[in-house]
Amino acid sequence: MGRIALKIDVDTLRGTREGVPNLARILDRARARATFLFSLGPDHTGWALRRVFRPGFLKKVSRTSVVEHYGVKTLMYGVLLPGPDIGRRAAAQMRAIRDAGFECGIHTWDHVLWHDNVRERDREWTIEQMTNSYRRYAEVFGAPPATHGAAGWQMNEHAFQQIDTWGMRYASDGRGHGPYRPCVDGEPLRHVQMPTTLPTFDEVLGIDGVDETSIAAKMLSLTAANDRDHVFTLHAELEGQKLAPAFEQLLEGWRAQGHQLVAMADYYAALDLSQVPSADIAWGEVPGRSGELIVQSL
């Protein structure tokens, strides 16, 4: 029986306040476990509008109804409105998820700032951003985080090394085909990367006629052979709101296929660590998403 680890990226204040509680209810009904990864600092979603000149960005926006999913107010944060501090404004919602029995971890400090800059930044900048998120997580939850999943699957070598420095055993910071230990300067790090293996909803919507009514069936076609494990990344702003009905259909379908719906901690606990290979970190494109992401080398 295959496992599907559900990794929930929470990017915005609205997603934390509205999408996260909605997802918790959906997951409870489906008897599914999951890992919520929180953005813990300022919400500067509006800064993402600067990506308009990047290849593929406008095409993706037109397919996925960004304004409808995120809301006009959220898209103004950092542009016409000050960016609210998510960790201060939504700490209660974050703790409620922990108290409901879900695994929690770090997504990022400032989502757009990290996503658009980390690839080219030095160690000092990288560690400052990560330290901000680590300290805020400890402040909100009263305990250190167990795991990390990078904003936009964007990392650099200093960020991977910091995960080891924190003593985390596992993380999910890129895309790939299975668990591996990432190599920096030819040497494998201690922690295990469990990359996202399935496409996300926003990468599939609008492609080959797939819409909100057919996206669950499209995803289920990718997991019909239930003899392997997967990591699926979803977003509080999408599956936790307008796409919630499609996500519920997907969970029901995965149950019918015989998959176990687990958190990242469960997935890691089931690994035979002696069989986890090492792999180099690389950059590459993913169908349906603009720009390059961290990918697992073959």
Image (cartoon, rainbow, N blue to C red):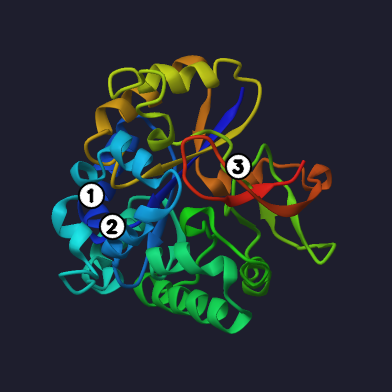
Query: Which residue is at a point 19% across and 42% down the rendered structure image?
Result: 68
Indicate the position of residue 88 as horizontal and vertical percent values.
25, 74
Query: Which residue is at a point 60% across and 19% down the rendered structure image?
Result: 226
Residue behind mark 2: 96
Q: Nearer the viewer, mark 3 or mark 1?
A: 1
Q: Nearer the viewer, mark 1 or mark 2?
A: 1
Query: Which residue is at a point 43% across and 19% down the rendered structure image?
Result: 218
Q: What residue type is labelled 3?
A: Tyr
Name the image quarter holding residue 125: bottom right
Indicate the position of residue 254 as horizontal and vertical percent values.
46, 22
**Element carrying mark 2:** helix
Label 3 and label 1: CA atoms lie apart by 30 Å
Indicate the position of residue 52 as horizontal and vertical percent values.
35, 54
Of residues 249 and 141, the one drawn nearer to the viewer in this rendering: 249
**Element carrying mark 3:** helix
Q: What residue type is labelled 2?
A: Ala
**Element carrying mark 1:** helix
Q: Is residue 143 left or right of residue 164?
A: left
Residue behind mark 1: 70
Of residues 289 and 142, the one drawn nearer to the viewer in this rendering: 289
- Specify the label residue 267 is tagged with: 3
